[in-house]
Amino acid sequence: MHYRLNAKLYMDLARKEVADFVGADVDNLFLVPNATTALNCVVKSYPFAKGDAILDTTWTYGSVYLLCEDLTTRIRPDVERVKLELTFPCSGPEEIIKKYEETFQKHPNIKMAVIDHITSPSSVVLPIKELVELCHRHGALAVIDGAHSVGQIPLNLTELGADFFTSNLHKWCYCPRGSALLYCAPQHTSWLHPTNTSWHLGGSLDMEFFDLGTRDHVPFYCARNAIQFYKALGGMEKIVGYTTGLAEQAKQLFEKDLGLTHLDIPASMEAPNMKMLKLPPFRDFPYCPENTWKLMEALFGNTKIFGILTPVEGAFYFRYSVQIYNDMDDIRAAADVIKAFMRKHAA
């Protein structure tokens, strides 16, 4: 009985804490299980007209990439998909902005652009402020996939001016898995809905997102405590100050001890806590995307180390992430695992 009577109160307290943390009005912010869910809500709610287009890129996160494909093939085949080709090396933010500008000029029917803040898994920080302004100049909604942003990069969503922004609280804010934010600019609340219809259709949007049938609200409630914990640790200045330094030390160690290189992007576009290390060819694991999981199991399966492997333009990359509980002993342990694997499986 206590839970049923106070469930909405706990949700609203958590929403307020998150909204204050990211510089948003609480009335425009909702809690959802993850960024993929948030983007499904936005993309599937938008009233596209026949002949409109949605823009994504070759760096778009996999599930969102498939969302754009599903929208334009199964759900709304009368909507065009425009896929911007982004490649490495990247000379800097100006190159990205120029490619978006050219794409908008070539496709004036683009009504929505889904843009990563920090690409995943490639960990590239995109110039979202400039891209949001560019979208609006061309009459397109700016939908920002900031899955890795909150807790890693300072945010003020009101100042950013994006139409939508989502970020996972369980990535870098110490929240349990299954907790993310969805920000909606006030001019769009009339047409946004959760992907599943439940008891509060036609009522307030915060009630629509709150009551979606039986589910566990605890990860949402924990967002309040997680952000308070984040602040108690010293906030972004202390946390990211430490992790950025550790990630840079890791980068230098991997390059010196393993003789490997990192993704070819300017330092200004590197995510604070995540880096991409280019792996050499392996005799038993020739390059093809289908071999990614096999290689990951072989490399990390019998160790206490784990990192994400991803195929990027003809090579496998190891994405490593650092947190406040990591130190250089962890980095050296990872280097030893990779070094031993390279000796055994070198092409």
Image: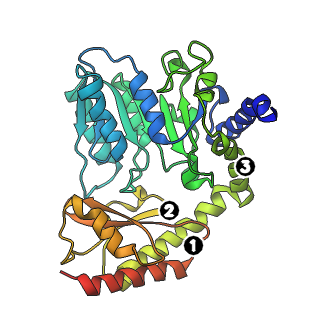
Is residue 129 among what the camera can see? no
**Residue 328 x, y percent position in the rendering:** 53, 80
In three-dimensional space, the C-alpha distance between marks 2 and 3, rounded to whole angstroms, equals 22 Å
Q: Position of residue 188 (x, y in %)?
A: 50, 20
In percent of the image, x 24 and y 64: which residue is there? 291
Query: From mark 1 to mark 3, how far is it between C-alphas?
Result: 22 Å
Q: Which mark is first along the chain, 3 or 1?
A: 3
Per the image, label 2 sits on a secondary structure element best described as: loop
Question: Which amino acid does the dot numbered 2 rest on?
Answer: Asn
Contact (Cβ within 8 Å) of mark 1 with mark 3 = no
- Name which of mark 2 and mark 1 comes first in the sequence: 2
Using the image, determine if residue 191 lies above or below residue 149: above
Measuring from the top left, give residue 302's x and y in whole percent.
41, 78
Per the image, the residue denoted by label 2 is 273
Residue 266 seen in this snapshot: yes
Label 1: which secondary element: loop
Q: Amino acid at mark 1?
A: Asn
Extreme-top residue of the structure: 202
Name which residue lies at 71% across and 61% down.
Answer: 233
Screen quadrant of the N terminus: top right
Q: Which mark is residue 210?
A: none
Q: Earlier in the sequence, mark 2 or mark 3?
A: 3
Q: Which residue is mark 3?
A: 225
Amino acid type for the residue under numbered disc 3: Asn
Dot 2 and dot 3 residues touching (CB under 8 Å): no
Question: Which residue has dot 1 on it?
Answer: 326
